[in-house]
Image (tube, rainbow, N blue to C red):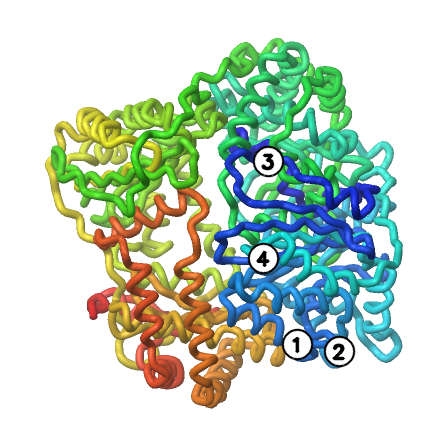
């Protein structure tokens, strides 16, 4: 399980669909007002927990310098509350609440307001929760809250919008019908206890949301809202720079108008699995080339145990990836690619603990061996794994992580807090994910006692399984078979030589000890330390967030990666070998708050190391050892090559709009190779080729280093020297230029794609004339202004599909707009006709835009572009992108913001007319069946020169 100590947070915060039952906290308003949530020493926000007269609980967050504000309302109602004869009704209600209120009846007004003030909004329906959220420019929080509150107190449920929006829900269902995740989930529902609400279909479609004269939908919708939505089942989190008193004043008088119907959250007291269902083996047919094995164990609900987290303790050991772990042994044997352990769903009455493994083709054939080793490891944890020393280490890492916690984006913060408020005491709402108060060996053993072969559902997802008598799920038509499992077949592990290699985690050597800050002020931006032994070195001391963390990026640019599709494939295989070789010993570092990534890109590979600076150098040195001399084995090569082939083949089974948009990127970016070219190369490359490639990979190199954060200049220099000695000592220095984007020819080019999916995918890409700031600014601003009207017309009014959006489509600083639609009914021609008609009518809308409205839209774009940094990693990433672009003034954002401010109304009209209406440089990609050959068009486009600079 990779998240490390963050797993403590994620294991609690990542509440999956079907998660948790309401845990009502009986506190009066005065008591809550006096409650001060325990916060991180590194947190300078102010908090107030209050309860309104209607029993709505509210957490106010005053972040005095925040440029963004946000709010999230969690309602303790979800798909588990759907009537059996109206499946998907809670999801449909979530859609309808956005579409007009008594005070703001226009169905598009809320979205337009949020979008025009630099924000975003959305919602989701889970099994026991529905969560609504938005963010916005901080100065517009009060007006946004006024609109937001009305959705819960006075929604209109406009009759003419009911039928229209049920079609949007159906389009959402249809767009994901061929996604293996949804299909697998539908099977899990199908084999669950029919008496449990989880068994029901959650999304909804035209059938379950029938709307006829005999059975109108709107009365059922209103009844459901009245019978389930109540202020006492709601929790609200509001975040802004205003004072706590000001925030409270914004909330009172608005949200206290929500009716308190004094309802109780539904209790799901039926068992998730029917009696005698377990143990069982479930086999499910996958459409993609994916192979997974999941062990699901029912355990008691863990909601009341959030302070001690016994399930996390157990999952941390089972999901460990260090030497001798279950994952390490299985991966060395070539049986699995990944393994994670953690909580599944928790209804408040019952929970599940899950072990999920991604299998290799060989592992698929050795499932019995994998299960045997898994239960042997569980036995080992049960017999030897419960120890105070391990608990104290986990607790120490959690405390360090909480102490130096960095801020989230406001909208992320309010989303998880509004959900968490349901389940924890007010004083714990901030610290709950990191709490590990007491060593609880009895609770650990109680959970481990449930992890037995006679209490498990073993689920296997694979393409074209041998199923004797397949069943089909009702709505997704996913084929599956469930059979009883012989629990006695997994008890002979003592005779297995692999069992002897299983070992529990050793003491973690990467726990940071020096957590102080280096001296000196934070630097405005990186400075060049010069070219040291051929390497460009950039350094920036940065302690603005008072966290002893740093990030180091090393890019090894080399011409070897971009020579051909074959070299691109070899680069990816080489990086896979390096990552595989370092995983076991680097995993403890991840648990201890360090993280790393090694990834290929168009110019070579990058090694990034981040986290607590104390032992960052140690981790980097260990990684470089493998980069310099990677161990390449036939077993790993075969597995990695097959994984790449599977991944490339699976691209043909992605959503249609994902395929159209990715096609445009691979076609127009210089140095990018098509899926077909990479697939051909992957099928042909050999291990000997990979070894030769690895031997010469660093023969010519163009290295660049950035050291940023809690590091001294001397430390950065020391790191530079070590890198040179370990990987660059024998390299020739070279220059590897950055890729550009190919310029489209004049007029519109259309490319049909043959895609096996019932929906039609459509992407219209319109390209700018040059990469200058003025051109980029015009496209950014037009994308901002056109996006909401495009959505409103094509999705809401014309009901073309669930996936509909217009957005800036900038690649490598080349300005462009993308118009994207996926439709279950319309053809590519129908969609294009609608887009053309919209473009013509939008001309009038834009021509009539006032200077005041234009100024507002400019400010919305600029606020997103210049959004406040809240984490060191965000700044590091921005610096690294600037270095990659050669923008070493580190002021690209400021220059683009200035250009946006300077865009005239005439320039916007010109861009709309030339690029969107006339399509002077446009590429239209759409999907269908029996499409004509597009080889010649693709060949012509790949021979085009790049878009010029300004």
Residue in front for this viewpoint, 154 or 15: 154
Work out how far the residue at label 3 is from the one at label 4, CA to CA, in angstroms. 21 Å
Structural distance between the alpha carbons of marks 3 and 1: 37 Å
Q: Which of marks 2 and 4 is in front?
A: 4
The residue beneath circle 4 is 70
Residue 480 place in picture, x, y as percent: 70, 45
Distance between the Cα atoms at labels 2 and 4?
27 Å
Local secondary structure at mark 2: loop
Circle nearer the N terminus (3, 4): 3
Whether residue 907 sits left or right of residue 296 in the image: it is left
Residues tagged 2 and 1 counted as in contact (Cβ below 8 A): yes
Please give the residue where the numbered disc 1 appears in the rendered image.
Answer: 107
The alpha-carbon separation of the residues under discs 2 and 1 comes to 9 Å
Residues at marks 2 and 3, CA–CA distance in whole angstroms: 41 Å
Which corner quadrant of the image does residue 898 belong to? bottom left
Q: Do callouts 3 and 4 mark residues in contact (Cβ within 8 Å)?
A: no
Question: What is the x, y in percent for residue 442?
Answer: 75, 16
Specify few, some or many for label 4: CA neighbours under 10 Å numbering under 14, 14-19, or 20 or more: many
Residue 240 lies in quadrant: bottom right
Where's the C terminus, which quadrant?
bottom left
Would you say residue 263 is visible in this rendering? yes
Residue linked to disc 2? 158
Query: On the image, numbered disc 3 is attached to which residue?
Result: 9
């Amino acid at each position: 399980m990779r998240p490390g100590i963050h797993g403590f947070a994620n294991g609690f915060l990542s509440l999956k669909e079907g998660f948790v039952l309401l845990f009502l906290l009986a506190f009066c308003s005065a008591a809550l007002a006096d409650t001060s949530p325990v916060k991180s020493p590194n947190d300078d926000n102010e908090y107030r927990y209050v309860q309104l007269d209607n029993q709505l609980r509210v957490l106010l967050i005053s972040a005095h310098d925040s440029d963004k504000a946000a709010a999230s309302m969690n309602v303790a109602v979800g798909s588990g509350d759907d009537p059996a004869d109206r499946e998907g009704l809670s999801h449909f209600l979530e859609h309808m609440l956005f579409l007009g209120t008594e005070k703001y009846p226009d169905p598009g007004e809320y979205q337009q307001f949020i979008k025009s003030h630099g924000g975003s909004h959305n919602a989701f329906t889970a099994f026991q929760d529905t969560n609504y959220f938005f963010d916005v420019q901080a100065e517009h929080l009060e007006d946004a809250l006024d609109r937001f509150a009305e959705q819960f107190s006075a929604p209109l449920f406009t009759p003419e919008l009911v039928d229209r929006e049920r079609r949007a829900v159906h389009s959402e269902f249809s767009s994901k019908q061929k996604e293996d995740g949804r299909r697998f989930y539908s099977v899990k529902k199908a084999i669950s206890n029919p008496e449990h609400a989880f068994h029901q279909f959650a999304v909804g479609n035209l059938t379950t949301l029938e709307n006829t004269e005999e059975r109108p939908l709107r009365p059922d919708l209103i009844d459901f809202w009245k019978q389930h939505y109540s202020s006492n089942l709601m929790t609200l989190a509001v975040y802004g720079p205003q004072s706590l008193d000001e925030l409270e004043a914004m909330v009172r008088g608005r949200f206290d108008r929500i009716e308190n119907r004094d309802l109780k959250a539904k209790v799901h007291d039926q068992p998730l699995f029917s009696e005698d269902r377990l143990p069982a083996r479930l086999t499910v047919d996958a459409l993609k080339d994916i192979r997974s094995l999941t062990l699901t164990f029912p355990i008691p609900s863990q909601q009341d145990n959030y302070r001690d987290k016994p399930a996390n303790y157990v999952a941390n050991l089972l999901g460990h990836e260090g030497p001798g772990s279950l994952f390490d042994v299985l991966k060395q044997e070539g049986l699995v690619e990944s393994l994670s352990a953690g909580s599944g769903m928790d209804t408040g009455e019952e929970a599940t603990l899950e072990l999920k493994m991604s299998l290799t083709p060989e592992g698929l054939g050795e499932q019995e061996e994998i299960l045997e080793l898994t239960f042997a490891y569980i036995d080992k944890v049960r017999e030897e794994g419960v120890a105070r020393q391990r608990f104290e280490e986990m607790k120490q890492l959690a405390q360090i992580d909480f102490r130096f916690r960095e801020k989230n984006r406001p909208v992320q913060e309010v989303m998880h807090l509004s959900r968490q408020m349901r389940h924890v005491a007010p004083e714990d709402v901030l610290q709950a994910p990191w709490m590990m108060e007491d060593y609880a060996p009895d609770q650990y053993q109680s959970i481990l006692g449930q992890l037995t072969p006679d209490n498990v559902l073993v689920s296997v997802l694979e393409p074209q399984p041998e199923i004797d008598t397949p069943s089909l799920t009702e709505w997704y038509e996913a084929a599956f078979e469930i059979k009883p499992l012989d629990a006695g077949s997994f008890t002979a592990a003592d005779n297995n030589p692999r069992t002897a290699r299983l070992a529990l985690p050793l003491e973690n050597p990467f726990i940071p000890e020096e957590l102080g800050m280096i001296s000196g002020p934070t630097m405005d931006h990186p400075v060049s330390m010069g070219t040291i032994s051929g390497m460009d070195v950039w350094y920036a001391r940065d302690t603005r967030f008072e966290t002893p963390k740093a990030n180091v990026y090393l890019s090894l640019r080399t011409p070897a990666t971009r020579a051909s599709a074959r070299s691109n494939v070899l680069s990816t295989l080489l990086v896979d070998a390096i990552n595989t070789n370092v995983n076991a010993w680097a995993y403890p570092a991840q648990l201890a708050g360090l993280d790393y990534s090694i990834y290929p890109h168009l110019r070579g590979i990058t090694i990034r190391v981040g986290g607590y600076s104390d032992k960052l150098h140690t981790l980097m040195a260990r990684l470089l050892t493998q980069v310099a001399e990677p161990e390449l084995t036939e077993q790993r090569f075969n597995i990695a090559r097959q994984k790449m082939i599977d991944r490339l083949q699976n691209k043909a089974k992605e959503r249609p709009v994902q395929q159209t948009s990715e096609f445009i990127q691979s076609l127009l970016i210089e140095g990018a190779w098509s899926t077909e070219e990479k697939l051909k190369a992957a099928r042909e490359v050999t291990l000997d080729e990979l070894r030769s490639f690895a031997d010469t990979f660093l023969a010519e190199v163009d290295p660049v280093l950035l050291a940023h954060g809690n590091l001294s200049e001397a430390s950065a220099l020391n790191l530079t020297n070590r890198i040179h000695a370990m990987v660059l000592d024998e390299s020739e220095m070279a220059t590897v230029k950055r890729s550009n984007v190919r310029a489209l020819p004049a007029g519109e080019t259309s490319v049909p794609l043959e895609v096996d999916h019932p929906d039609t995918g459509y992407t219209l890409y319109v390209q700018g004339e040059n990469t200058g700031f003025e051109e980029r600014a015009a496209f950014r601003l037009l994308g901002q202004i056109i996006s909401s009207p495009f959505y409103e017309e094509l999705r809401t009014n014309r009901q073309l599909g669930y996936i509909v959006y217009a957005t800036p489509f900038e690649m490598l600083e080349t300005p462009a707009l993308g118009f994207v639609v996926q439709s279950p009914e319309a053809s590519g021609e129908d969609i294009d006709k609608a887009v053309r008609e919209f473009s013509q009518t939008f001309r009038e809308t834009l021509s009539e835009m006032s200077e005041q409205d234009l100024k507002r839209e400019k400010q919305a774009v600029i606020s997103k572009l210049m959004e406040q940094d809240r984490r060191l990693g965000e700044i590091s990433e921005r610096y690294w992108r600037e270095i990659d672009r050669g923008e070493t003034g580190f002021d690209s954002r400021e220059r683009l913001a200035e250009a946006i401010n300077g865009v005239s109304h005439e320039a916007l009209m010109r861009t709309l007319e030339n690029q969107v209406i006339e399509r002077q440089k446009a590429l239209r990609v759409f999907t269908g069946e029996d499409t004509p050959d597009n080889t010649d068009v693709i060949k012509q486009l790949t021979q085009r020169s790049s878009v010029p600079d300004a």
